[in-house]
Image: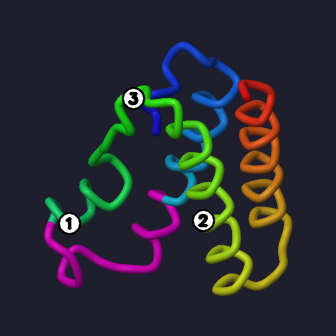
């Protein structure tokens, strides 16, 4: 998604901030013995692109909503979670304006 959204600063910055925060969380939740470095890296920093297709925006919205749902399902309600959910909401709103 970040590859496709480089020109859309609002989406890019918010999604990148969410990615960084989740990367920090996973490193607190799992030690290096639990996951090799390559797995840690690919978890949030391996990128796939929708190739700028007309469906890319729709797919990205769907992906962001899925991430949001998974976070709310697996983490207790707290300020850091609400912050991430809010950033995802703002990224989705920005993507919806592209339609």
Q: Is residue 48 magenta?
A: no
Image height of 8 relative to 96, above or below: above
Quarter the C terminus occupies: top right
Q: Secondary structure at mark 1?
A: helix
Badge count: 3
Which residue was labeled with disc 1? 39
Q: CA distance from mark 2 to mark 3?
A: 18 Å
At label 3, counting other C-alpha atoms closer than 10 Å, the crowd grade (few under 14, some 14-19, many 20 or more) is few
Question: Which label belongs to residue 67?
Answer: 2
Measured from the top left, where is residue 22 in percent x and y? 53, 60
Q: Secondary structure at mark 2?
A: helix
Which residue was labeled with disc 3? 3
Query: Which mark is first along the chain, 2 or 1?
Result: 1
- Say left or right for 48 vs 79: left
Measured from the top left, where is residue 64 in percent x and y? 62, 55
Looking at the rendered image, the disc whose residue lies closer to the viewer, 1 or 2, is: 2
Q: CA distance from mark 1 to mark 2?
A: 19 Å
Front residue of 51 and 30: 51
Question: Which label belongs to residue 86?
Answer: none
Stretch in magenta: 23-36
Q: Residue at x 57, y 53 (%)?
A: 21
Image height of 54 relative to 70, above or below: above
Measured from the top left, where is residue 34 in percent x and y? 23, 84
- Say left or right for 89 vs 75: right
């Amino acid at each position: 998604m970040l590859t496709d959204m480089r020109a859309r600063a609002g989406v890019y910055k918010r999604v990148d901030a969410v990615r960084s925060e989740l990367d920090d969380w996973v490193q607190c939740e799992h030690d290096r013995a639990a996951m090799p470095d390559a797995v840690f890296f690919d978890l949030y920093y391996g990128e796939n692109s929708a190739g700028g297709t007309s469906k890319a925006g729709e797919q990205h919205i769907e992906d962001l909503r899925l991430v949001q749902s998974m976070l709310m399902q697996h983490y207790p309600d707290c300020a850091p979670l609400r912050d991430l959910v809010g950033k995802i909401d703002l990224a989705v709103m920005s993507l919806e304006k592209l339609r």
